[in-house]
Amino acid sequence: MILGIVQTDPVFGDIIGNQIQVERLLGNHKADLWVLPELALTGYETRGRAESLELSEELPHGPSAKWLHQLCRDRNCHMIMGLIEREGDKVYNGSVFIGPDGMVGRYRKVHLFDKEVTRFDPGDIPFNVYDIGVARVGIMICFDWRFPEVMRTLALRGGQIVAHPSNLVLPYCQAAMVTRCFENNVFAATANRIGTEERDDRSVSFTGRSVIVGTQGELLASAAVDATDVLLVDIDPTRADIKTINPYNDTFGTRRAEFYEI
Ligand code: ACM
């Protein structure tokens, strides 16, 4: 299957312009599964919870999800994209997983980073793995990478690919993903953004260098640090089912979970 990433340079609040940018970058490229950045159409730095709510939508019928569904139908593919999800009086830094037949799943960021704590409610649904036929896919968002339990949980639940919509502001994650993939023998696609957001007295820059990493920690593709980009890699997801280290050791079988209790 072809795994793709779109690395974007969104403008805060310009939903339509950001959609056009994604469509332009997708062009005629073909992939079975595309991963787009965190908060891909809204931008990152909301002024607080009220602005997060203004830019939020309900799933599965919100405007960004509808737009993404149309793309999936037109291109006969699956896509995972970060967006602001609202449910009742809660507002989440979320991701939606959509295919040609509609919504497959969703995720709500569990580990909120820095001021996100003042803008969103923490995620409240499990680290689910979704089987889309060509692969079993789990989702985490940006700062979740910093907690190795996340990818471990997704891998233990059978995930072959970890889709990782991101708006990275620090330079450490891309290198860490090599270890995360190696220690779990899974593929990962970290879809980051570039550019700077200036909002009020804060200026936040994003670190680009989106990466696709293989089950042995191989860097299969990486994007530019300061330009929009598209990454495409032909992978065999079943390689993630091979957890053998040597005839005596297995990534999961050799775990001694009874010794990990605190
Ligand atoms: C981040 O979690 N967006 C840094």
Image (spheres, rainbow, N blue to C red):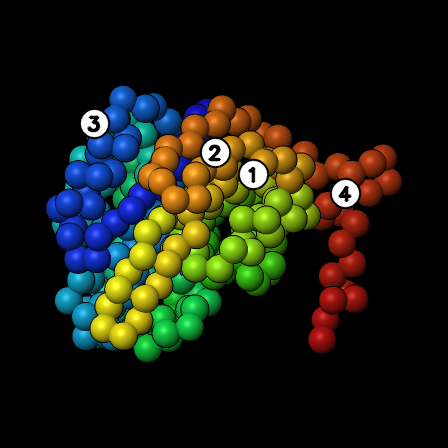
**x%, y% of residue 244?**
75, 37
Q: Which marked residue is nearer to the observer: mark 1 or mark 3?
A: 1
Task: In the rendered structure, find residue 202 and report the number of the disc placed on it.
Answer: none
**x%, y% of residue 25?**
27, 33
Q: Is residue 125 visible?
A: no
Instruction: Identify the element where label 2 is drawn.
Output: loop
**Is 224 left or right of 50, judged from the image as shown?**
right
Q: What residue is at 43 percent from the left and 68 percent from the top?
A: 113
Rendered image quadrant of residue 92: bottom left
**Alpha carbon distance from label 2 to label 3:** 20 Å
> Does label 4 point to a residue whose CB lies under 8 Å from ligand 1?
no
Identify which amino acid the numbered label 4 is placed on: Asp
Q: Which residue is mark 4?
A: 250
For marks 2 and 4 on the same chain, the one whose residue lies earlier in the sequence: 2
For marks 1 and 3 on the same chain, the one whose residue lies earlier in the sequence: 3
Identify which amino acid the numbered label 1 is placed on: Val
Task: In the rendered structure, find residue 74 and report the number of the disc placed on it.
Answer: 3
The foreground one among 192 and 90 is: 192
For marks 2 and 1 on the same chain, the one whose residue lies earlier in the sequence: 2
- Packing grade of label 2 (10 A; few <14, some 14-19, many >=20) is some
**x%, y% of residue 172?**
56, 56
Q: Which marked residue is nearer to the observer: mark 2 or mark 1?
A: 1
